Amino acid sequence: MKKIMNDPVHFVDEMLQGILIAHPDQLTTVDGNLRCIVKTNKEKKNKVGIATGGGSGHLPLFLGYVGDGLLDGCAVGGVFQSPSSDQMLEVTKSIDQGAGVLYIYGNYGGDIMNFDMAAEMADMEGIKVAQVIAGEDVASAPKGEEGKRRGVAGIFYAFKIAGALASELASLEEVKRIAEKTCANVRTMGVALTACIVPEAGRASFTIGDNEMEIGMGIHGEPGIRRGALQNADDIVQQMADKILADLPYEKGDEVSVLLNGLGATPKEELYIMARKLHEILKAKGISVFNTYVGEFATSMEMAGASISLLKLDGELKKLLSKPANSPFFTQVQL
């Protein structure tokens, strides 16, 4: 294992210390608790607070989207581990501005259990909490069983769009509605080329051959839908796009936002090669592209690979997606 780190036990906390040192104008802790990250400057009174949480190892998920026009706070777990309900409660109390708090998080058992507990404790403190669970990975469950799907890079769209509406002082019910609408219109599929190493484990969590790839693998190494010989970029994108487009389905005349996401060790050059082919596929199907995001939005430590997410747009989603946003890991001017 080759990593630039000290004692693996301190990997997450030392990472968080570095982020806070680098971005003190944007991020801070709740009462010195490194695992509870919130915005340095709170926005308007009576604004719905939006919180997330999840395991480390996925930067910029999850804390990377704490910022203006995005999230207000995040509970941080260990590498690939859920944050605790107590941590989530502390974030909730810190970001509550009187209009309630919305939790947006991925569809994983530990997260669901701890967020549910945090919501119950927040209710006892007089804070109204609503929840939206993101799960858009088409490889993780068949159509008709969407409730079993994993939340992956497409959760970015829920953060961005719900954050934009919350900044307009919409009600908790409205912010929850738009987050649910966003999640219902996003589909994602990934491909993995290599494994990743959890620092405390000191070894790869799974193996994949030098000349192999796995279509549909999850961001923790969850099984995909097919493992086989490594193919060229165009063939990989075609397989991923076929699964995504058939699932919603996306149809001729639709307008979409595109997200090309690197999993941690994939050069941007390769992501742009994928973007080229994806645009070609969409154009041939009569689907127009409003905008394209390319970069790292949800990683898996040093895993090589990528994911494609498509968000089907209407006027409301497009307007909110276009709003400016700013965090240490994501900045957007008005589109």
Image (cartoon, grey):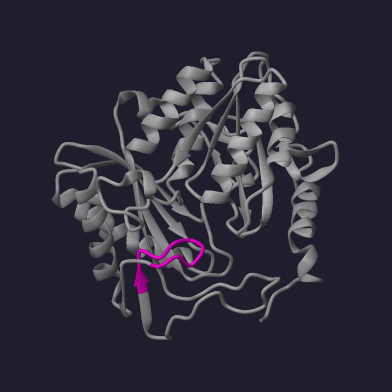
Query: Magenta includes 127?
Result: no
- In the rendered image, the quadrant that contains the C terminus is top left
Q: Tell me where residue 268 appears, x and y as whole percent.
A: 46, 63
Quarter holding residue 231: bottom left
Dominant secondary-structure state across the stretch colored magenta:
loop
Q: Tell me where residue 294 appears, x and y as whole percent.
A: 44, 53
Q: Name the residue: 54% across, 63% down.
A: 300
> Does residue 235 appear left or right of residue 141 in this picture?
left
In magenta, the rendered stretch is: 214-223
Q: Tell me where residue 287 appears, x and y as whole percent.
A: 20, 43
Q: Name the residue: 49% across, 61% down.
A: 219
Between 185 and 165, the one nearer to me in the picture: 185
Q: Name the residue: 42% across, 46% down.
A: 154
Query: Magenta includes 215?
Result: yes
Residue 230 at least partly seen: yes
Residue 72 at least partly seen: no
For residue 285, above or below residue 157: below
Quarter holding residue 327: top right
